[in-house]
Amino acid sequence: MLHICLSGGPSGGKSTSISKICTELQEKLGIHCIVNEECATQLITGGIYPGNNISMDDFQEFVLDLQLAKEELSRRAASFYDEDKVAIIYDRGLLDQMAYIEKEKFEKLLAKRGLTIADVNNRYDVVLHLVTAAKGTNAYTTANNVARRETAEEAIIADDKTLKANMTHPHLRVIDN
């Protein structure tokens, strides 16, 4: 079973890349793909978002719980396939949350669930960091994701923080925009 995590700042092409990766894996290698869609977007479009009523810390705890549940469900579903013919593709990894919450607070959230950063790194075979379109291009947009609210400057900061959060992964690859 292959675990591929796509990381990066807003408007880096993660969602678009997932479609292409799955097509390639399925058509060329006969590998079945299970996709874990981005949890923060799912929550925001469902009416749960940080703001006046929900702090960013509380929101990130919601994201963490949802992502852990979805990852477990995907792993269970993947067990029904030949282990060599299934891949789980993650639209953002758990550590991406450290772009939006302090590392110490995130480590406490993980510890509350019996996890460490090393445990999280072991969940993914590779982390592909897709650099945000806000860096060096005019292609950055919020139009293709109703949950995206960052300015181009904020997207660059989130991209840098996301990359920093994933630097401990032994198979981190950075893909320029």
Image (cartoon, rainbow, N blue to C red):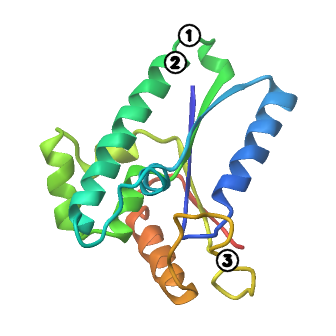
Residues at discs 2 and 3 in contact (Cβ within 8 Å): no
Q: Give residue 77's mark.
A: 2
The kind of residue tagged 2 is Ala
**Could you say whether the residue bearing mark 3 is in a helix, strand or loop?**
loop
The kind of residue tagged 3 is Thr
Q: Is residue 168 visible?
A: no
In the picture as drawn, the residue positioned furthest to the right comes out as 28
Which residue corresponds to mark 3?
A: 141
Q: Is residue 38 visible?
A: yes
Which residue corresponds to mark 1?
A: 80
Q: Judge from the rendering whether residue 143 lies leftward or rightward of residue 56; answer left or right.
A: right
| Whole-percent x, y for residue 52 in the image | 24, 72
**Could you say whether the residue bearing mark 1 is in a helix, strand or loop?**
loop
Residue in the image at 29% along x and 58% along y: 60
Residues at discs 2 and 1 in contact (Cβ within 8 Å): yes
| C-alpha separation, residue under disc 2 versus residue under disc 3 | 34 Å
Q: Earlier in the sequence, mark 2 or mark 3?
A: 2
The kind of residue tagged 1 is Phe
| Whole-percent x, y for residue 133 in the image | 68, 77
